[in-house]
Image (cartoon, rainbow, N blue to C red):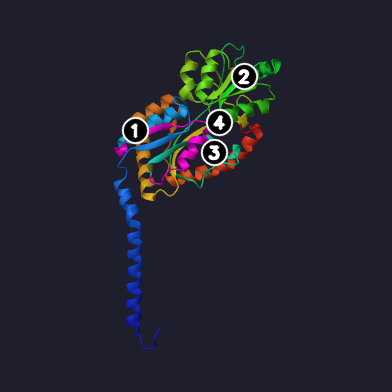
Amino acid sequence: MPKNWTGRAIAQIIRTTSACLLAGLAVSAAPALVRAQAYPSKPIKMIVPYTPGSPVDVLARVVTQATSRELNQTIVIDNRPGAGTTIGTKAAAESAPDGYTLLIGATSFVIAASLYPKLDYDPIKSFAPVAMLAVAPQTLVIAPSLPVRTVPEFVTYAKANPGKLNFGFGLGTLPQILGESFKAVTGTDIASIPYRGGAQAITDLLGGTIHMNFGTQATLLPLIRDGKVRALAVTTEKRVSDLPDVPTMAESGLPQLSLTFSAGVLTTVGTPAPIVDRLNAAFNAALRSPDLVATMAKLGFEPQNWSTRQYGDFLAEEMKRWPPIVKQSGVQPE
């Protein structure tokens, strides 16, 4: 720098340079800001990697209906089941980072990371967390034709009839992990029957082909009340209000099976932060709606209101928690 330059001249150069840098940053950020302000200007798609009519599908439909009103824009459900929910999840990971493709990720989203080591996406790095939706207990149910009414009685009966009972589940789901863990910790020989979706397993449970199943209240509660299936235990730490006479797994002697269902919304990583924040606000507003809260309660779901950071931290902890659970269950990729 020339020796004859004054302090005032140097200060002016610094101010001019800083102004140029700030202007450049503003110009580069402008397109993202404009997109965020205009969002959503067209229908949004939510990929549901489960079969139509499944508990997660039902949850997605009731929540998106309410959230559509908050966004003043339609949210279209796109069911893409298969391969333990990884087909639909991969499609979501490969979508444009513009907020117009969402994914409902339930507990299977986390389980897949342990069950399928060579996924075509990274559960954490490929997605941006949007909003936590709900948690829910799982309920162990059996065919009412079986002469048992408690978990200990069921274990005794299963051991007296090795290989004669069937357990149904959707591949890569929490019910599969719970069922296989149940078999492992009780030492029972119960045949495992995989299905493309959990709803199909329930159909066969009603038809007598399946004798044991785990599921959410959204599907099972009406069947339990009608006597079409028999509830033996819930996976929550405390008994649930809709089934006050059904003990917990811990009360039944199996505390290691106290595992609950969770579900949230994600979008493609790289989606502008203002759009993610807009979505988070819309979902949380919908989840505070008295009508939606009442609907979810009837389905056995407990709504949550979390920030994107809280949901991201939750997913990170779940990624650490589930690998040993999956390993203990003995479940192998199909």
Q: How many marks?
A: 4
The mark closer to the camera, 2 or 1, is 2
As drawn, the label of residue 174 is 4
Q: Residue at x 34, y 85 (%)?
A: 6
Vertical side of 301 occupied by 321: above or below: below
The disc, 1 or 4, on the residue closer to the chain's N-terminal end is: 1
Start-end of magenta stretch: 70-98
Q: Residue at x 37, y 38 (%)?
A: 283
| Residue kind at label 3, given as amino acid type | Val
| Residue kind at label 4, given as amino acid type | Leu
Q: Which residue is mark 3?
A: 110
Spatial CA span between label 2 and label 1: 39 Å
| Residue kind at label 2, given as amino acid type | Asn
Residue 187, given in percent of the width and then of the height, sits at 70, 25
Residue 333, given in percent of the width and then of the height, sits at 61, 33
Which corner quadrant of the image does residue 230 belong to?
top right
* Within-10-Å neighbours for mark 1: few <14, some 14–19, many 20+: some
Q: Is residue 88 magenta?
A: yes
